[in-house]
């Protein structure tokens, strides 16, 4: 059927602006604020249909196989993780979801992810609470407040922030950020110790809060770059209409830019959440590993699924590896759901906008 | 008229009062200074904190004061506008702080071991009390692993993108496109676990007398899984930017579609594709978690990625960070500086190349 491709099908799929994100970020804020249809690829290949095998069918077959490879990999990840996780889970003597210790290498393996799941959740929530407002403010600054001369280099710097490896942030968090966070924790504990999450007797420092703050810095560029693209696509007409009605700049942002960008921002936040949930090395370096279920944010302690994989892998035997793979499988499932939701939001929004345009 | 009547009952419009009153810059600065002074007095007077709290509280006072003072002069809405603008500018300053700190720390701590020994020797036979030692083996590992990963991922990714843009129609192509996007969000540790359970534990025993074997190639496979979606995504984007008339011109000359793709579409999009590939390589070079799980982390030099363990620069940073030796932190920071330098050179090069790209949205 593709021999006479009427490429109009591309018209709806042609826009990639929303999802290009950190992966290419090429235009760094210089692209026009109004959405324009990119030139549509392709044209009619007016050759008559060939029934026999040719280079054409061969090339088509190879590229289709390469495209299908992505699906194969995702399915393979699920299959192989499950196949290695099940034997270990069968040997587990306690409930995998509610037990709060990790001793899979013992004669009677007992491991559960209660502490890990809680730590993953807490650190990700802290990261998002800190990073999202700042990221949105930067995105707004880059698109609507900063002069072009400042916006381009600043966008560039934010993109560079995304390129710094996580192990470097982890090392920095442990060696540099830990001091101020400890001071801050002591202060919080002194004045707000009556709130349970800031309570405790110490020691402070390598806490969930430190891990969460490092995560926040790593999530920031993702949320920023996606929100920036969304804000840039606000129809100029909407903005001008708001200004013409006498709105101040902030009111224009509030009634024209933010509502228009809302689905994109939600998607950006979820992508950031996906990154925060799966981050390994930065947390392995900054959390002070403990196995107590605790909501305390500032006492040394905390753990996360991914950090535990990195930390416990060295001394794991067969069952131990299986147990770690089981926790990784859970992480995979959660991030898959989060990412699919985020992408689904982006895709739906794109259809909506294309039909409206 | 009622609105006018209420607000200014007996004012005649002249060119003077037609313009709304502006809150002067001097007053703005005055509010800022006053806020800082009050906050310093409160904080230091009661002894509840140090200069950080002074700044934070001063910021809050400044916003409140600005809102009040500007509200008296300009009206409530304009004052709110000012306040939000101040907040947005503050957020940007806040975001620059950690980046500046990371850069400063990297340079100030990283130069300690930036010597020939570091780039010329491995960690073999370097005990906890020994100074010296280097990252030569780790740099070799990173280059080989990322190189092999690129060799696998680039053809696969570009072909996949060609499928999505040139051939893909209907539901299947939509599914592939969707899962490419989803795959970009797979945590790197999961990719590592996948290669661990698939290659290290199941496939590698076939080649190694039934013993599972860590290897640099396994790390390459994990990096491939991470690079593939990035490459597909950026290449797809670039291919879509190739103008349709170029293709049509080629078809009109009787060139078959596959040849059009290889000879017209790909060369036109090449600079953009290279940019995407470089960004993917930069990302892969900085990955620690998958390498930690499947490469083994050898301390001696091993040039063969298919036989025996290897280290990588990112893994080396992690290992040295966890090492109790007093010389380890210096090594870790110098390795981190090297790693960031490699990654940033790749990234900046990619961005500069992207600027010269003639295909734009």
Image (cartoon, coloured by chain):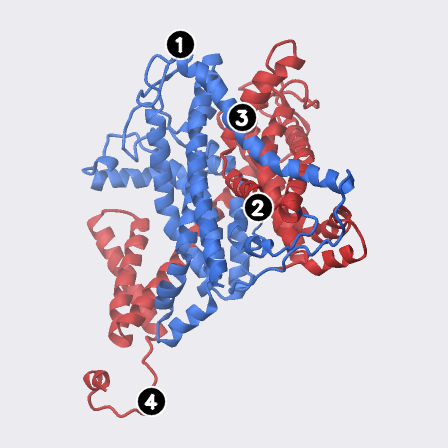
Residue at the location (35% across, 65% down)?
A255
User: Reading the chain from its start, which is encountered first: label 3 or label 2?
Assistant: 2
In this figure, which residue is indicated by the disc labeled 2? Answer: B170
> For the residue labelled by badge 3, is the local secondary structure a helix, a strand or a loop?
helix
Residue found farthest to the top: A107
Q: Secondary structure at mark 2?
A: helix
Q: How far across and how far down the image is residue A200, in percent? A: 24, 31
Task: Name the residue rendered at 70%, 56% in the picture.
Answer: A44
**What's the colour of chain B in the image?**
red
The chain that hosts pointer 3 is B
Helix, strand or loop at disc 4? loop
**Are discs 2 and 4 located on one and the same chain?**
yes
Label 3 Cα crowd, 10 Å radius (few <14 / some 14-19 / many 20+): many
Residue A142 in view: no
Cα distance between the residues tagged 2 and 4 = 65 Å
Which circle, 3 or 1, is nearer the viewer? 3
* Labels 3 and 2 in the same subunit: yes
In x, y percent, where is residue A102? 37, 18
Between marks 3 and 2 in the image, the one whose residue lies nearer the viewer = 2
What residue is pinned by disc 4?
B16
Host chain of mark 2: B
The span from disc 4 to disc 1 (Cα, nearest Å) is 86 Å
Q: Is residue A351 above or below residue B118?
A: below
Quick one: label 4, few (<14), some, or many (20+) residues within 10 Å? few
Label 2 neighbour load within 10 Å: few <14, some 14-19, many 20+ = few
Specify the colour of chain A.
Answer: blue
| Badge 3 and badge 1 in a common chain | no
Q: Position of residue A336 (x, y in %)?
A: 45, 36
Q: Which residue is mark 1?
A: A106
Whether residue B5 appears in this view of the structure is yes
Question: In the image, which disc is placed on residue B194?
Answer: 3
């Amino acid at each position: 059927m593709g021999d006479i491709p009427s490429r109009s099908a591309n018209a709806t799929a042609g826009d990639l602006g929303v999802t290009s994100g950190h992966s290419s970020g090429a235009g760094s804020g210089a692209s026009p604020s109004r959405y324009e249809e990119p030139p549509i690829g392709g044209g009619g290949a007016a050759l008559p249909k060939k029934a026999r095998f040719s280079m054409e069918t061969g090339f088509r077959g190879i590229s289709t196989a390469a495209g299908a490879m992505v699906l194969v990999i995702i399915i393979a990840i699920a299959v192989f993780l499950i196949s290695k996780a099940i034997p270990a889970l069968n040997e587990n003597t306690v409930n995998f979801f509610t037990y709060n210790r990790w001793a899979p290498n013992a004669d009677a393996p007992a491991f559960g992810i209660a502490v890990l799941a809680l730590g993953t959740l807490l650190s990700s929530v802290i990261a998002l609470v800190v990073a999202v407002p700042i990221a949105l403010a930067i995105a707004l600054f880059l698109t609507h407040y900063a002069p072009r001369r400042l916006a381009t280099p600043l966008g560039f710097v934010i993109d560079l922030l995304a390129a710094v490896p996580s192990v470097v942030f982890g090392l920095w968090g442990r060696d540099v950020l830990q001091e101020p966070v400890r001071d801050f924790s002591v202060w919080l504990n002194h004045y707000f110790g009556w709130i349970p999450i800031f309570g405790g007797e110490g020691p402070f420092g390598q806490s969930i809060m430190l891990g969460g703050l490092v995560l926040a810095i790593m999530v920031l560029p993702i949320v920023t770059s996606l929100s920036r693209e969304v804000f840039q696509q606000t129809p100029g007409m909407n903005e001008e209409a708001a200004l013409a009605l006498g709105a101040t700049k902030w009111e224009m942002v509030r009634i024209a830019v933010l509502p228009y960008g809302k689905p994109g921002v939600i998607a950006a936040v979820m992508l950031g959440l996906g990154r925060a949930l799966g981050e390994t090395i930065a947390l392995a370096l900054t959390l002070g590993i403990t196995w107590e279920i605790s909501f305390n944010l500032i006492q040394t302690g905390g753990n996360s699924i991914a950090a535990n994989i990195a930390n416990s892998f060295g001394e794991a035997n067969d069952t131990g590896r299986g147990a770690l793979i089981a926790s990784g499988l859970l992480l995979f499932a959660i991030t898959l759901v989060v990412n699919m939701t985020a992408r689904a939001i982006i895709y739906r929004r794109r259809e909506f906008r294309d039909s409206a345009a | 008229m009622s609105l006018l009547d209420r607000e200014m009952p007996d004012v005649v419009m002249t060119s003077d009062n037609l313009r709304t009153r502006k809150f002067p810059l001097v007053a703005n600065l005055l509010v800022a200074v006053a806020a800082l002074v009050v906050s310093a007095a409160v904080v230091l007077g009661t002894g509840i904190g140090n200069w950080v709290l002074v700044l934070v509280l001063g910021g809050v006072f400044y916003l409140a004061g600005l809102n009040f003072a500007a509200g008296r002069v300009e009206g409530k809405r304009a004052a709110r506008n000012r306040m939000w603008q101040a907040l947005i500018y503050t957020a940007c300053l806040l975001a620059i702080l950690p980046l500046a700190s990371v850069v400063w720390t990297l340079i100030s701590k990283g130069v300690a071991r930036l010597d020939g020994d570091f780039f010329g020797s491995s960690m073999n036979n370097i005990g906890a009390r020994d100074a010296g030692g280097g990252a030569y083996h780790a740099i070799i590992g990173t280059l080989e692993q990322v190189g092999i990963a690129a060799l696998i991922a680039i053809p696969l990714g570009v072909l996949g993108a060609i499928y999505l843009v040139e051939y893909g129609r209907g539901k299947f192509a939509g599914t592939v496109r969707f899962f490419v996007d989803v795959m970009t969000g797979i945590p790197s540790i999961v990719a590592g676990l996948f290669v661990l359970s698939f290659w290290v534990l199941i496939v590698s025993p076939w080649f190694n007398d039934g013993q599972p074997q860590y290897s640099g190639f396994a790390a390459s496979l994990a990096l491939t899984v991470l690079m593939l979606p990035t490459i597909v995504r950026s290449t797809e984007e670039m291919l879509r930017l190739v103008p349709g008339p170029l293709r049509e011109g080629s078809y009109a000359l009787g060139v078959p579609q596959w040849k059009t793709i290889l000879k017209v579409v790909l060369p036109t999009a090449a600079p953009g594709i290279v940019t995407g590939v470089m960004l993917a390589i930069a990302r892969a070079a900085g990955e620690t978690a998958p390498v930690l799980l499947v490469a083994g982390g050898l301390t001696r030099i091993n040039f063969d990625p298919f036989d025996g363990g290897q280290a990588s620069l990112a893994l080396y940073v992690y290992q040295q960070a966890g090492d109790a030796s007093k010389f380890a932190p210096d090594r870790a920071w110098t390795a981190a500086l090297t790693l960031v330098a490699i990654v940033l050179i790749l990234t900046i090069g990619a961005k500069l190349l992207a600027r010269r790209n003639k295909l734009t949205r």
